[in-house]
Amino acid sequence: MQMLTAEETGRAAARLTAEIKKLAGGRTIRIMEVCGTHTVAIFRHGIRQLLGDAVELISGPGCPVCVTPANYIDAALACAKQPGVILTSYGDLLRVPGSRESLAEAKAQGADVRVVVSPLDALAIARQEPQRKVVFLAVGFETTAPTAAAALLSARQAGVENFLLLSAHKTVPPALRSLLTQGACLDGLLLPGHVSAVIGLAPYRFLVDEFALPSVVAGFEALDILTAIRALARQIAAGRAELENQYRRVVLPQGNPQAMKILLDVYQPVDVEWRGLGLLKESGLVLRPAYQVYDASLVLQLKTQPAVEPKGCCCGLVLQGRMQPAQCPLFARECTPLKPVGACMVSREGACSAWYNYGKRGEGA
Ligand code: SF4
Ligand code: SF4
């Protein structure tokens, strides 16, 4: 993208906004932004306010922390409480409520839970503490799954046997299929930039072929997002449904074949539970049989219990785009980023957290 001054960016944004409003032709276009980083960027750049009634932007299931069900946190807690285990995790996950408590609470009570910024940090801990089992909470979409897989391959190559993964990795296209099959009322989709950089465009083809839904891959700058929304508005106005890539400086049609190869070598697809969306066919990634000695759920013999979701929390409806966060009765009352009731209020990329932090607690959204 060509570097523009703030003034030039402002002028370009105004032109795009005017064009989108004209294309909307007096109606409200309903667009879902699938990715949590888009949700935050949309708020940060004030795009909702710019577009007014011409476009309703609906947050989707694109924050990996938000869609991780409570019973995964319960399984992580069961790991943390086993003697000799060090649990390692990205920071966000620590505050996600499990059925009874969070990892942060378990840590406060003495469990050895450590925050890391990458699975390679967890692997380094495993090398330093060979007598302990080091479990990495492998959460995320196609963007982070290859990194965890690469760490596992490094462990195997180095003969590190005490490094384990507890995989809750998920893939985005099955979640989109589920939303559309359940009748989500949308005019278009803003597709996630980073996930698309890994998987490419082909896995989204069903969106236009089967559901005739205009779908555009978008970047994260204000003009990226507005350009992608304009592309959607043009399709909608012309009655077209096409798959477009408006983030060509990062996303190649074929994605990242090297990352996909690592992902497919190490993991296999399985049906898994998503918070708010239920059991989705072949939407999860678990370790293939050749890597099961690194699978924490098998090595530590974890038993998964049905999830108990927090009382009154509407994360399910928010993640399906059926409710805006501020419509949840607990929003900004019992549930705040400091004291989250549901997972959508925990991660910075969670829809409820973004609405709270950037949407002036929903008032300005
Ligand atoms: S991992 Fe990438 S695609 Fe997924 S929510 Fe974060 S920024 Fe969006
Ligand atoms: S505001 Fe809190 S309780 Fe309500 S849906 Fe969001 S996370 Fe759940």
Image: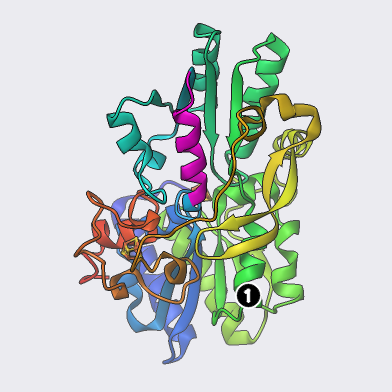
In the picture, measured across the screen, residue 135 lies left or right of residue 3, that is: right
- Residue at the limit of the structure toward the bottom, as seen here: 26
On the image, numbered disc 1 is attached to which residue?
A: 180
The quarter of the picture showing ligand 2: bottom left
**Numbered-mark total:** 1
Locate residue 340, reporting x and y percent: 29, 53
Residue 99: x, y in percent?
41, 51
Q: Is any part of residue 293 visible from this angle? A: yes
Residue 93, how many percent across, how many down? 41, 41
Camera-side residue: 117 or 200?
A: 117
The magenta span reads 71-83
Determine whether 285 is above or below 283 in the image. above
Quadrant, the C terminus: bottom left
Disc 1 crowd, CA 10 A, few/some/many (<14, 14-19, 20+)? some
Disc 1, SS: helix
Q: Quadrant of residue 38?
A: bottom left
- Say whether mark 1 is within 8 Å of ligand 1: no
Residue closer to the observer: 61 or 271: 271
Q: Is residue 1 visible?
A: no
Question: Which sits in the foreground, 36 or 240?
Answer: 36
Residue sitting at x 30%, y 52%: 6
From what the image shows, is residue 271 above or below residue 326? above
Which is more toward the observer, 213 or 249?
213
Residue at image coords 50%, 53%: 69
The answer to which image quadrant residue 127 occupies is top right
Q: How is the image coloured?
A: rainbow
Q: Looking at the magenta stretch, what is its main secondary structure?
A: helix
Identified by mark 1, the residue type is Leu
Is 232 within the magenta?
no
